[in-house]
Amino acid sequence: MSHSHGPTADVSVRPGLADDARAWAAIQVSAWRDSYATLWPAGALDALDVPSIEATWRSALVSPPTAKHRLFTACAGPVVVGFAALAPAPEEEGTGEIVALEVTPARRSDGHGSRLLAACADVLRQTNASAVRTWVVAGDDARAGFLESAGLAPTGLVRTIDVLGTEIREEAWRAAL
């Protein structure tokens, strides 16, 4: 999706704008369908609804729960190609949690994920956070490899989420800042 925000760099990460919410939702749906095709029940992926997800992201941007909640947009020129959402980790004082980091599947090897991760780490350092954490669906080897290459490592902490009656295991990954 293209936006006209004046001159833009070839590739960049900037704070999220309300106009980005539709692109974020479309990117999230396509990224999840690509990454989780064999890890989630098919019905869950088919049920993903771009307008509902857009409304959720727009609300998160317009009315964040705290000042430490942030949204970032990755762009290739004027085209939105990825996003990240950052929040305080609920039970870990001084830790920021990347609750979403998605790049459109066709642009994943262009460095946008690394730029988004760096933007999250930069903001966390500016707010005196000491660590960053995120969750990875068990079996998502591509995301695990990306995080490992960026210096994050599994913590051993595991949680399960219910996706249409199927228990999906997620593992926490963490790095000190």
Image: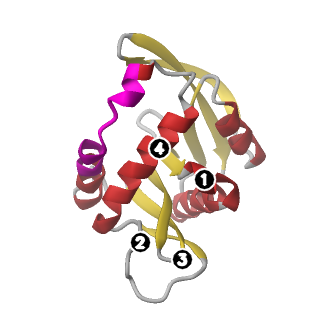
- Which type of secondary structure does the marked residue at label 4 adopt? helix
Which numbered disc, 1 or 3, marks the residue that appears first in the sequence? 3
**Alpha carbon separation for disc pair 1 and 3:** 15 Å
Amino acid under label 4? Ser
Can you give x and y, in whole percent of width and height, for residue 88 in the image?
43, 46
| Mark 1: secondary structure | helix
Picture disc at residue 106:
1
Q: CA distance from mark 3 to mark 4?
A: 20 Å
Of the numbered discs 1 and 2, the one sitting upstream in the chain is 2
Of residues 167 and 152, the one nearer the viewer is: 167
Residue 156 placement (x, y as % from top left): 65, 22
**Which residues, given as a range, are shown in magenta?**
43-55
Q: Mark 3 or mark 2: which comes first in sequence?
A: 2
Q: For the residues marked 4 and 1, what is the alpha-carbon distance in whole angstroms?
A: 10 Å
User: Is there a contact, CB below 8 Å, between mark 3 and mark 4?
Assistant: no
Q: Name the residue carrying label 4.
A: 30
Residue 77 tag number: 3
Report helix, strand or loop for mark 2. loop
Q: Is residue 51 magenta?
A: yes
Find the distance from the CA under tag 4 to the CA under tag 2: 17 Å
The percent position of residue 96, horizontal first and vertical second, equals 50, 47
